[in-house]
């Protein structure tokens, strides 16, 4: 029987970056299909009790930095704790992933390249020229892909993924749904692994 995991995320999330490759490896091991669904957390947070980073209480912000250090060191993933371009608008980057998939490119490598650009390379993933360069580095036609990402068609798909996420009670990133069972966070991947093994 086929296995499918719905993957709701944003390229601007450090937690998604920390878990992305582990998640893809888990999916490969279980022959599971990933439905990549980048979404707009700017619309999800107000409906789910979440707050943008800058509006969180100081103690929560401080603890987040401590946790990022722990997970970076534990996983051995290169990560800048406070990158130059973050918080960052990620709508165009998310739509770039959607455009790439619609053009037949696998969305996983480009998604990770965008995350790595933000969290390890101090690149601005809200800048169109930077996005075009990242796409080109992935063997994709960067400028053309950015132009496609800006079209109403891709915007409608992005909005649809976001509405779907809201309807399915997604509230954080990364968020995985397998057989209607939700898993929030890269630190829940062990539980998703076990669910896929059943």
Image (tube, grey):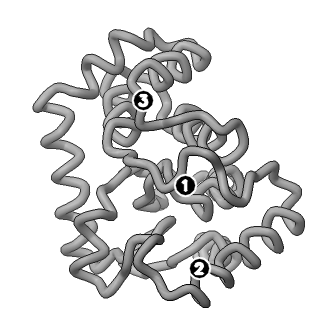
Q: Is residue 143 left or right of residue 197?
A: left
15 to 92, vertically: above or below:
below
Q: Secondary structure at mark 2?
A: helix
- Considering only vertical position in the picture, is 111 above or below 151? below
Query: Contact, CB < 8 Å: mark 1 with mark 2?
Result: no
Q: Position of residue 6 (x, y in %)?
A: 41, 60
Residue 129 appears in the picture as rendered: yes
Q: Position of residue 56 (x, y in %)?
A: 46, 82
Badge nearest the viewer, 3 or 1: 3
Q: Nearer the viewer, mark 1 or mark 2?
A: 2
Query: For the point 72% across and 43% down, which residue is it?
Result: 120
Secondary structure under badge 1?
Answer: strand
Residue drawn at 28 percent across, 27 percent down? 149
Q: Which residue is mark 3?
A: 127
Q: Earlier in the sequence, mark 3 or mark 1?
A: 1
Q: Gap in Å between the C-alphas at discs 2 and 3?
A: 26 Å
Using the rendered view, name the quadrant where residue 18 is placed: bottom right
Q: Position of residue 40 (x, y in %)?
A: 30, 57
Q: Secondary structure under badge 3?
A: loop
Q: Callout 3: 10 Å neighbours few (<14), some, many (20+)?
A: some
Q: Kindly identify the residue that appears in the image at 25 percent across and 20 percent down.
A: 148
Separation of disc 1 and disc 2 at Cα? 35 Å
Q: Nearer the viewer, residue 187 or 192?
A: 187
Residue under circle 1? 32
Q: Position of residue 186 (x, y in %)?
A: 63, 69
**Which residue is more in the foreground, 132 or 157?**
132
Dot 2 corresponds to which residue? 61
Q: CA distance from mark 3 to mark 1?
A: 33 Å
């Amino acid at each position: 029987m086929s296995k499918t995991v719905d993957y709701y995320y944003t390229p601007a999330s450090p937690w998604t970056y920390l878990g992305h490759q582990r998640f893809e490896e888990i999916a490969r091991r279980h022959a599971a299909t990933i439905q990549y669904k980048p979404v707009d957390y700017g619309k999800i947070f107000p409906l789910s009790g979440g707050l943008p980073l800058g509006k969180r209480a100081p103690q929560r912000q401080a603890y987040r930095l401590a946790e990022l250090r722990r997970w970076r060191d534990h996983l051995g993933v290169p990560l800048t704790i406070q990158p130059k371009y973050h918080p960052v608008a990620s709508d165009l980057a998310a739509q770039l992933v959607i455009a790439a998939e619609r053009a037949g490119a696998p969305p996983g490598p480009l998604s990770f390249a965008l995350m790595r650009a933000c969290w390890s390379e101090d690149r601005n993933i809200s800048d169109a020229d930077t996005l075009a360069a990242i796409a080109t580095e992935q063997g994709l036609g960067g400028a053309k892909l950015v132009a496609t990402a800006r079209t109403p068609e891709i915007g409608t798909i992005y909005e649809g993924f976001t509405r779907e996420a809201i309807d399915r009670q997604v509230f954080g990133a990364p968020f995985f749904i397998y057989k209607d069972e939700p898993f929030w966070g890269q630190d829940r991947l062990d539980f998703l692994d076990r669910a896929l093994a059943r």
